Image (cartoon, coloured by chain):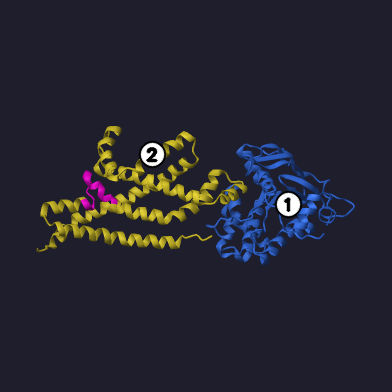
Amino acid sequence: MTFDWSVVWQHRDALAAGTLTTILLTVATMAIAVPCGIVVAILRLYAWRPIAALTTAYVELFRNLPLILVVYWAFYVLPIMTGLGLSPLVTGLAALALNVTAYNAETFRAGINSIRRGQLDAAMALGMSRTQALRRVVLPQALRRILPVLASTWVSLFKDTSLVSVIAVTELAYVAMQIRAQTFRVLEMLTALAAIYWLLGYPQAKLVDWMQRRFAVTE
Amino acid sequence: MNSAMSPRAKSTRSRIIRYQGVIKRYGDFQALSGVDLDVHAGEVVCLIGPSGSGKSTLLRCTNGLESIDGGSIEFEGAHLSRDERTLRAMRQRMGMVFQSFELFPHLTAVENVAEGPRTVLGKSRAEAAERASAMLAKVGLADKAPNHPAALSGGQQQRVAIARALAMEPDVMLFDEPTSALDPETIGEVLNVMKALADEGMTMVVVTHEMTFARRVGDWVAVFDVGRIVEQGPPQQIFEAPTTERTRDFLSHLGWNG
């Protein structure tokens, strides 16, 4: 069996563009799913009961569906629901954000619950409102505590963005598969794909480790 | 110190807190079964008694961290409100110090103390920091301003917690077993700060197992047992001539010989 690695170099522009889309998808998904996750977690913990129940239903639904199913679902259902002809990129982003927001909400909820009652008491005793206590005392501590979990969600997400290739989002995996189909250089393209994901994913994981040490709070 | 002629020397001053028939239940458990107690301006009132007798519960009801199920609590002439906003305004005038300090671990000492003035009173960053530095100096910890709580000893953390409460310029300080979680060698530094506060005329309600403190610094001592006050009076009475068997019993279990 002979290999022809030049195929990777020949398609470097397409691969670079795909990589950029993958990174963009990851960043955009997290940019949506972190604040939304916090809001969902707070609603689930403190909101008026029917609202809390609604958010619980959302979290339990999307946390327990395979992501690829959500991607397909978004592709077929979102246009009907919104009446808009959404691009594959926006559709993929919506599916990822729905999924990751549900995960993040659970992470934040666990983080908030892990802060002991006395901290809230101390904040309230100073005369803070519940909202102030949450914003100034509970959330900052919860965020630091769950940073490692958010980080591993980030690294998973970076790889999971490849699932939106099924609806023709031109991210890294989709681009690589297209090149494979055109050139029949299967092993070369798969290896290149793996190398790119790993080379990008590993430093992210390391960066996250560093952040964890940098922002750690000891009691 | 109290004079023997006047059993409650400061009772002619204005009454700051009045508890009347206070009842608190947790499910089937009755934590407080009708507590009556007055706290006057400038007084140090010590609440003593065995664990689980309701002392801390009464303190937590005082600033509304726990709601009461019967009776009433008046603070500066007004009934303790159930309305969050009014309750918050009352809490600002009551400083609270916890057994487990409850400093905010993500903030430095000076940030901890500045947090109340900044967030609750809406002071500018500079003004809040200035007040916080002054309060840290007052408890003898000016040099620890940039340290996080984790870098401080238990006694130092509790003094920062006292400074944090004082930064709100409260009318009353509530102490919930402030030295119970401390190593013996750091208890003294916290009690000294509390004594200095009392000497300045701060009104204080102190739940404590430190009988020496209650005796030397207290103006009035209330002995709790199973959710009631079984005896209250000036420290001389409680520690030298207790009138109830229950008080004698409690003190003898502590090895207190009068």
Q: Which residues are magenta?
A: A160-173
Q: Was residue A205 drawn as part of the magenta stretch in this picture?
A: no
Q: Name the one closer to the observer, A76 or B120.
A: A76
Disc 1 marks a residue whose amino acid type is Gly
Asked whether the residues under marks 1 and 2 belong to the same chain, the reply is no
Dot 2 crowding, Cα within 10 Å, few <14, some 14–19, many 20+? some
| Residue for badge 2 | A58
- Label 1 marks which chain's residue? B
| Residue for badge 1 | B49
Q: Was residue A165 drawn as part of the magenta stretch in this picture?
A: yes
Between marks 1 and 2 in the image, the one whose residue lies nearer the viewer: 1
Disc 2 marks a residue whose amino acid type is Tyr
Q: Residue at x 33, y 55 (%)?
A: A155
Rendering coords of residue B15 (x, y %): 78, 44
- Label 2 marks which chain's residue? A
- Determine which of the numbered discs, if any, sits on residue B27 in the image: none
Dot 1 crowding, Cα within 10 Å, few <14, some 14–19, many 20+? many
Q: Residue at x 72, y 62 (%)?
A: B192
Rendering coords of residue B195 (x, y %): 74, 59
Q: Quadrant of the C terminus of chain A?
A: bottom right
Q: Is residue B108 left or right of residue B184?
A: left
Query: Does B163 appear above or below A168?
Result: below
Query: Circle 2 — which element?
Result: helix
Q: Colour of chain B?
A: blue
Q: Is residue A71 left or right of residue A128?
A: left
